Image (spheres, rainbow, N blue to C red):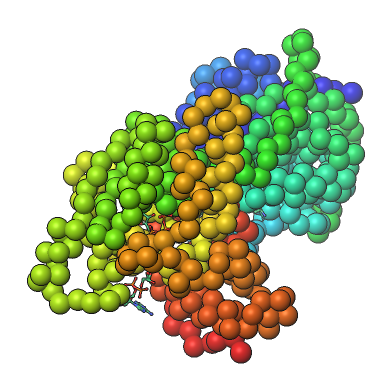
């Protein structure tokens, strides 16, 4: 049985950075070669980053991607790496885009995977199944491929597939069985969602069985705008048993030896409704250098740790890829701003985090002392900027009352944050959690100002859970607990008028989050919610608030997706909408 030394490169490309991404491929291939690998696979659209969205419609970008691929093949050879087989995802096109008057249903932009070897592009595979749900819009951009590429590498037939090809039965995996492939490689840009790692592992086992072949799944790591990629690359045997699994949320080069069946004969020219193209790269593999590369199975992590890591990764990559070096956060001593600050300290270091306490005449003593305590525990930069004089100046010049005065305080804080951002160059982080965003419990152009929102997809009850987990984790490691206990235990309040509590306007968060999980995430009807045991009056109030707040959400900052349905691309509703649940 031939032994193939395979390397899966779990790396972090940046959208649009063709030069930087090619550099990652060259550097990582060098490391794979040093480890004796013969085949190295990079993630989906490695060269362009993923997803590239409407950049697909720019012919100049498509041309740049194709040219960068050819240059990469040549550069790898110049680097002395031409003897390896290197799989690189990129953007290709064999016809005009859907936006063009000359659009052709059979040709156009392609989500593509190339095999590079010996200084040239040996073969190109075009993704067959295009995801078009949730955050994905691939029918908008790409024309599906209908040819399975099978490449003989060292006497083993290797079938090439891309991400969604794994998620649907039939097509490439069924064709790979007919082709008699010994290994199927699946390259991914698969965004993180809580518990998705379990789903992926089961899918890999199912598809390996469908193909009757070993399956090597490589995913990217890092973040792109609202999407977080958790890595979690995995290799499963034809019997579905995991052979190796990489860590989540960390770059990794996974190198392992696979004993694979020797290919015999030539595959048929078609199968499972697809054409099959067979290319022979090499019949005979050099024997992999001893010792054998055996890769372990990385430990799975607990749910809270996983979500925390996703939020840290999402924030870190947003800050760094947008070329900021510091952030500023308004600190109220409440749980949301405290958790955002703790995430920021973990993501970019406390020395790059600036907290501002902005007490008003309604601010409690604990709002100031808890914020100061947080600063002390974490070491973030801390300053106090009272807002009363500015609010008073407004009120002396503009006649306002009631809610307008309440919101004015939040807006003065927003102006101060943006001024500090302009003056000192920090990215402003906003702190509204998913529950508040759902019901519109925030002041537009007030506490909602900011360029990025780490809690955008985190319901309030999960914010508390994460805070408790983060402190417990610090304690386990013998470190200072970053979050003041009082910030976790006190009742939430906007402190925009004397004695105000969130529960004056909202149900208790346990009940609110239970309703929101079903109405927002599950698209349940009013009748479903009431049948589920919720009080009709509460249901009506909550779903009314959710429906009315669409205009606020449409203007809200981006933030990392951690759930199957995050606000934004996952949930698209009209702002003007008279439909009300009866
Ligand atoms: N359909 C629509 N399309 C576009 N714009 C629309 C609109 N409806 C209202 N608007 C605009 O929005 C304004 C109303 O929104 P906005 O000014 O935000 O004010 P509003 O939503 O009326 O009040 C803010 C609420 O959030 C609470 N809050 C504020 C700050 C922090 C927290 C917290 O605990 O985190 C809670 C506060 O107690 C209050 O209940 C209107 O005056 C109008 O200008
Ligand atoms: N006194 C304050 N000083 C600085 N920032 C404040 C202050 N009060 C509110 N903010 C900012 O406005 C956001 C809205 O928070 P608010 O206190 O109104 O309720 P919240 O949503 O429960 O948030 P938190 O739990 O952080 O208090 C806060 O997260 C914080 O960023
Ligand atoms: N890039 C893709 O094709 C991703 C789609 C796939 N269902 C996933 O979430 O992993």
Coordinates of residue 564 in the picture (x, y in percent):
63, 59
Q: Residue at x 86, y 36 (%)?
A: 241
Image-based side of 543 in relation to 327, left or right: right
Viewer-closest of 325 and 173: 325
Residue 297 occupies quadrant: top right
Q: Is residue 235 above or below residue 339?
A: above
Coordinates of residue 237 in the picture (x, y in percent):
85, 35
Q: Is residue 402 above or below residue 469?
A: below
Viewer-closest of 381 and 392: 392
Residue 59 occupies quadrant: bottom left
In the picture as drawn, the residue positioned furthest to the top comes out as 290
Coordinates of residue 421 in the picture (x, y in percent):
25, 47
Q: Residue at x 89, y 35 (%)?
A: 265
Q: Is residue 556 above or below residue 50?
A: below
Viewer-closest of 527 and 246: 527
Q: Can see residue 129? A: yes
Q: Residue at x 68, y 37 (%)?
A: 301
Number of marks present in the image shown: 0
Q: Quadrant of the C terminus?
A: bottom right
Residue 82 occupies quadrant: top right
Coordinates of residue 478 in the picture (x, y in percent):
56, 25
């Amino acid at each position: 049985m031939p032994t193939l030394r395979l390397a899966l490169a779990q790396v972090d490309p940046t959208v649009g950075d063709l030069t930087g991404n090619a550099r990652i491929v060259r550097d990582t291939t060098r490391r794979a070669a040093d480890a004796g690998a013969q085949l190295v696979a990079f993630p989906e659209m490695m060269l362009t980053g993923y997803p590239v969205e409407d950049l697909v419609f720019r012919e100049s970008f498509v041309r740049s991607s194709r040219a960068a691929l050819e240059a990469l093949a040549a550069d790898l050879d110049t680097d002395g790496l031409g003897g390896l087989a290197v799989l690189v995802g990129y953007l290709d096109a064999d016809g005009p885009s859907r936006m063009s008057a000359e659009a052709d249903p059979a040709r156009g932009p392609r989500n593509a995977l190339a095999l590079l070897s010996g200084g040239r592009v040996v073969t190109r595979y075009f993704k067959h199944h295009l995801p078009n749900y949730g955050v994905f819009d691939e029918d908008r951009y790409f024309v599906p491929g209908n040819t399975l590429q099978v490449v003989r590498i060292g006497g083993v037939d290797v079938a090439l597939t891309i991400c969604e090809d794994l998620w649907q039965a039939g097509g490439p995996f069924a064709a790979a069985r007919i082709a008699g492939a010994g290994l199927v490689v699946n390259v991914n840009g698969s965004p993180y969602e809580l518990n998705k790692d379990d789903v992926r592992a089961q899918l890999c086992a199912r598809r390996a069985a469908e193909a009757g072949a070993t399956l090597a799944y490589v995913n990217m790591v890092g973040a792109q705008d609202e999407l977080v990629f958790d890595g979690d690359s995995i290799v499963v045997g034809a019997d579905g048993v995991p052979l190796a699994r990489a860590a989540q949320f960390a770059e990794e080069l996974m190198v392992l030896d696979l004993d694979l069946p020797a290919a015999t004969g030539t595959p048929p020219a078609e199968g499972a409704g697809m054409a099959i193209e067979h290319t022979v790269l090499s019949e005979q593999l050099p024997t992999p250098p001893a010792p054998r590369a055996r890769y372990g199975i990385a430990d799975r992590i607990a749910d809270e740790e996983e979500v925390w890591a996703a939020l840290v990764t999402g924030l870190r990559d947003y800050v760094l890829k947008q070329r900021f070096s510091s952030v500023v956060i308004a600190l109220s001593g409440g749980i949301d701003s405290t958790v955002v600050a703790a995430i920021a300290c973990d993501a970019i270091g406390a020395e790059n985090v600036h907290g501002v306490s902005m007490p008003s005449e309604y601010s409690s003593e604990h709002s100031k002392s808890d914020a100061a305590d947080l600063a002390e525990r974490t070491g973030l930069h801390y300053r106090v900027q009272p807002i009363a004089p500015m609010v008073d100046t407004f009120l002396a010049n503009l006649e306002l009352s009631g809610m307008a005065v309440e919101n004015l305080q939040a807006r003065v804080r927003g102006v101060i944050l943006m001024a500090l951002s302009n003056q000192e160059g920090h990215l402003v982080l906003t702190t509204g959690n998913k529950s508040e965003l759902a019901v519109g419990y925030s002041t537009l152009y007030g506490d909602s100002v900011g360029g990025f929102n780490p809690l955008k997809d985190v319901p309030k009850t999960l914010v508390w859970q994460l805070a408790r987990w983060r402190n417990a984790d610090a304690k386990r490691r013998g470190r200072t607990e970053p979050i003041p206990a009082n910030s976790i235990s006190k009742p939430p309040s906007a402190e925009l008028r004397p004695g105000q509590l969130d529960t004056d306007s909202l149900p208790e968060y346990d009940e609110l989050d239970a309703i929101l999980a079903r109405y927002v995430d599950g698209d349940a009807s009013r009748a479903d919610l009431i049948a589920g045991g919720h009080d009709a009056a509460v249901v009506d109030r909550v779903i009314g608030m959710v429906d009315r707040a669409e205009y606020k959400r449409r203007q809200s900052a981006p933030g990392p997706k951690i759930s199957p349905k995050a606000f934004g691309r996952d949930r698209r509703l009209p702002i003007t909408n008279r439909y009300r649940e009866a």
